[in-house]
Each structure stands twice: as C-alpha cells, then as structure tokens.
Image: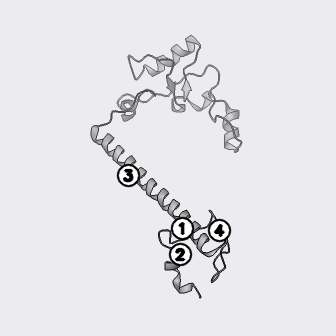
Amino acid sequence: MFLFPKDEDLSKAWAKQVQRTRKDWEPTKYSVLCSEHFTRDSFDESALLRAQMGIATKRTFILKKGAIPTVSPRVGTSAVGQLSTSTSRPARSAFAMRERKRKVEELLAESVVESSSFASTEESMEMATDRHGTGTGTTESRSGLPDRLDSNSYCQHQDTDWETTHKDTVKG
C-alpha cells in the first residue's frame, strides 16, 4: 500500500487517476493505493531483484520518484464496485455478529477445558510423586516408566489416576 504523496502536484495527479472510476472521490491523509494500480516500470527495479533473489528487504515494491498510478479497473467490471477506502468496514448483519460472538465464546470455553485438564494432569503427577517417591519429583522405575516426573512429562491418560490405568503393569 502506498500513501498519497506529500507533493501537491503529484497528489493531484494520483487523485485524478482514481477519479476516473470514482467521480467525486477526494483523498484524505489516510488514502492509499495498492501496487495493482501501477505498471511494473513504476517500481524501483533493484528492490524487485533483491526480492526475487531471496534477499530480505523491508518492502518488495518501492515506487520510483514521480510515479503516477495508471492502471485502473475498467468501468462496468465487478472490480469497480469492490473499491473501498482502507478506513471503511463492511456492514455486518446482527446474525453475523451473533454468530461470531457464539464462536468466540465456544473457543473460550474449549480453552478453559483444556487449561483445567492440563492443571489436573500436573496435580496428578504431583500426587503420584508424593505417593511413590520422596517428594522431589523422582519415582521408582517400574516396567520401563521414566524415573523422573516433571512438568515436561506427558501421560496419554490425563483424566485418570496412573495406578488405576496401569495396574496391570505394576508389580508388587
């Protein structure tokens, strides 16, 4: 996106090009045009080459000094009706807003469930450590199970007690 130039004459030339398809349009200090409105020769070639060669640049498209937008959608095409300013938002129906709110609430509820499941897993691991170890997070090795439980350990049976799930593997 390119802000309108500060040079008054150049800004008027840009506005004139936009007004070819939007008759009463006047630019504001926030008005912008995208790269689609400029021909390839309007851009600094060195920036384009650096981008094509994979050299990191802040911006791929840098306009040459004095570049004027010359590419405009033709009158009667669907693109003309789709033009909008960058500050306007499409109108949303009440249904769409309610649906979005419902989805957000649903995702938040899922997030809370996952968080509480993670917390209960950590509590179960601490309880297992206290039951079978010295309280320092170590456990006696049983049937190839890890010797140490810590916050990075993972159990696929998060919602169950270790002994009831794995009682067939416990000796003794």
Nearer the observer, disc 2 or disc 4?
4
**Residue 59 locus on image (x, y percent):** 64, 34
The quadrant of the image that shows the N terminus is top right
Instruction: Determine whether 44 is above or below 52 in the image.
Output: above
Single out the mark in the foreground, 3 or 4.
4
Give how far apart the Cα atoms at labels 4 and 1 are.
Answer: 13 Å
- What amino acid is labelled 1 in the image? Ser
The answer for how far apart the CA atoms under marks 3 and 2 are is 31 Å
Query: SS of the residue at dot 4?
Result: loop
Name the residue located 53 percent from the left edge and 78 percent from the top edge: 163
Front residue (pair 42, 61):
61
Residue plotted at (55% across, 70% down): 155
Query: Which amino acid type is shown beneath numbered disc 3?
Result: Glu
Name the mark nearer the viewer: 4 or 1: 4
Is residue 119 left or right of 85 when viewed as pictured? right
User: Residue 42, percent across and down?
Assistant: 60, 27
Q: Which residue in the structure is indicated by mark 1?
A: 124
Marks 3 and 1, the one that precedes in the sequence: 3
User: Mark 2 = which residue?
Assistant: 162
Residue of label 3: 106
- CB under 8 Å between discs 1 and 2: yes
Amino acid bearing label 2: Trp
Sequence-earlier tag: 1 or 2: 1
Answer above or below: position of 154 versus 61: below
Question: Quadrant location of the C terminus?
Answer: bottom right
Q: Indicate how the structure is coloured in the image.
A: one colour
Numbered mark located on residue 135 in the image: 4
Report the residue at 58% width, 72% height from top: 128
Mark sitting earlier along the chain (3/2): 3
Q: Using residue 3 as the reference point, say whether residue 88 is left or right of it.
A: left
Contact (Cβ within 8 Å) of mark 2 with mark 4: no
